[in-house]
C-alpha cells in the first residue's frame, strides 16, 4: 500500500524556472492538500482540493497553481521560482467525514538559488 | 490565526511526563495532533471534536476545552520513541475532510535515556 507518493524528493531550481511537484494517492481519498514547511513556521496551507475538478486557495497561495483532474493526482506548479519558495513541501490526503486523519507524503525539499 | 503552541521545546528523561498546549484566538471545531520525526512526514496521533472530549492513544492522551479554545496533549511515562516535533492542527468549521487545517509552529520534544 503506497499511500501518498511525492516526487521528486529533492530539487534545486534557478530563480525564474518553473516546475511541477507531483503528488499521487492510492487510497481513493477525496480531499488533498499542499503544505509548505519552513523552520519555525510549522506547516502552512498552500492550496487544497475537495474532489476532482475542485480546488481552492489556502493561506499562502501566491506563486503556486494546482489542478485536480483525477481523484488520485494533485500536482503543484511553481510558475516562476523565487528564493522565498525554498522550503519542504508536503502533500496530504484524507477521507470524507470528520474524524478522518490526514496522510502525508514524504515531502519534497526544494531549494531555489 | 495560527494556533500558539507551548512550550516551543522540552527535554525529558525517559519515564517523565510532559504536557504540550495549543491555544487559538478563534473558536474551534476540532483539534488534530500530529508528530513528526526529523526528516519524515507528520504522522496522525488523534483528533478531538467540539464537545470537550478527551482521547487517548497508548500513553498519549489529549483534551479539548472549546470554551477556552485550548487543547493539551499529555505524554505519560515518556519513551525514547516519543521524540519528535508535535504539531496541533485546528479547524474552525465543520469540514468534511482535513484539507484546511491550520497548524501551530510545533513543540520539539527530546527524550534522553
Image (spheres, grey):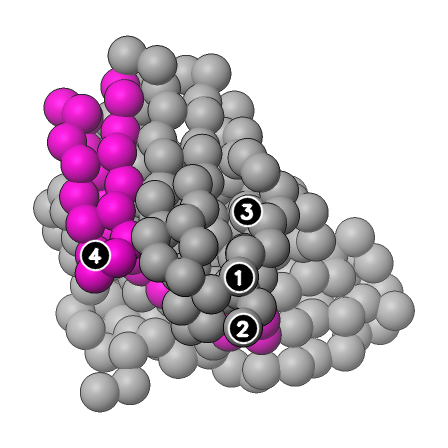
Q: CA distance from mark 2 to mark 3?
A: 23 Å
Q: Secondary structure at mark 1?
A: strand
Picture residue at 47% right of the left edge, 65% below the top: B14
**Residue A47 seen anywhere in this rendered image of the structure:** no
The mark closer to the camera, 1 or 4, is 1
Provide the chain ID for the residue under circle 2: B
Q: Which residue is mark 1?
A: B13
Q: CA distance from mark 1 to mark 3?
A: 20 Å
- Check whether the beta carbons of the residues at disc 3 and disc 4 lie within 8 A of each other: no
Q: Which residues are magenta?
A: B37-66
Q: CA distance from mark 2 to mark 4?
A: 22 Å
The dot on residue B113 is 2
Q: Secondary structure at mark 2?
A: loop
Q: CA distance from mark 1 to mark 4?
A: 20 Å
Q: Secondary structure at mark 3?
A: loop
Picture residue at 80% right of the left edge, 57% below the top: A82
Q: Which residue is mark 4?
A: B57
Provide the chain ID for the residue under circle 1: B
Amino acid at each position: 500500500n503506497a499511500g501518498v507518493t511525492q516526487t521528486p524528493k529533492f530539487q534545486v531550481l534557478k530563480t525564474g524556472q518553473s516546475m511541477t511537484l507531483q503528488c499521487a494517492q492510492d487510497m481513493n481519498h477525496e480531499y488533498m492538500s499542499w503544505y509548505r514547511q519552513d523552520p519555525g513556521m510549522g506547516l502552512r496551507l498552500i492550496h487544497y482540493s475537495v474532489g476532482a475538478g475542485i480546488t481552492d486557495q489556502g493561506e499562502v497561495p501566491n506563486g503556486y497553481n494546482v489542478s485536480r483532474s483525477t481523484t488520485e493526482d494533485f500536482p503543484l506548479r511553481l510558475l516562476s521560482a523565487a528564493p522565498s519558495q525554498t522550503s519542504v513541501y508536503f502533500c496530504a490526503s484524507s477521507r470524507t467525514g470528520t474524524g478522518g486523519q490526514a496522510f502525508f507524503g514524504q515531502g519534497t525539499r526544494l531549494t531555489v538559488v | 490565526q495560527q494556533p500558539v503552541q507551548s512550550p516551543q521545546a522540552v527535554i525529558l528523561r525517559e519515564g517523565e511526563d510532559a504536557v504540550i498546549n495549543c491555544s487559538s484566538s478563534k473558536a474551534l471545531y476540532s483539534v488534530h495532533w500530529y508528530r513528526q520525526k526529523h526528516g519524515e512526514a507528520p504522522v496522525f496521533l488523534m483528533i478531538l471534536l467540539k464537545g470537550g472530549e478527551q482521547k487517548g492513544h497508548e500513553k498519549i492522551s489529549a483534551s479539548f476545552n472549546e470554551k477556552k479554545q485550548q487543547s493539551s496533549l499529555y505524554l505519560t511515562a515518556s519513551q525514547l520513541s516519543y521524540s519528535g516535533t508535535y504539531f496541533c492542527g485546528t479547524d474552525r468549521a465543520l469540514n468534511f475532510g482535513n484539507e484546511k487545517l491550520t497548524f501551530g509552529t510545533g513543540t520539539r520534544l527530546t527524550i534522553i535515556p
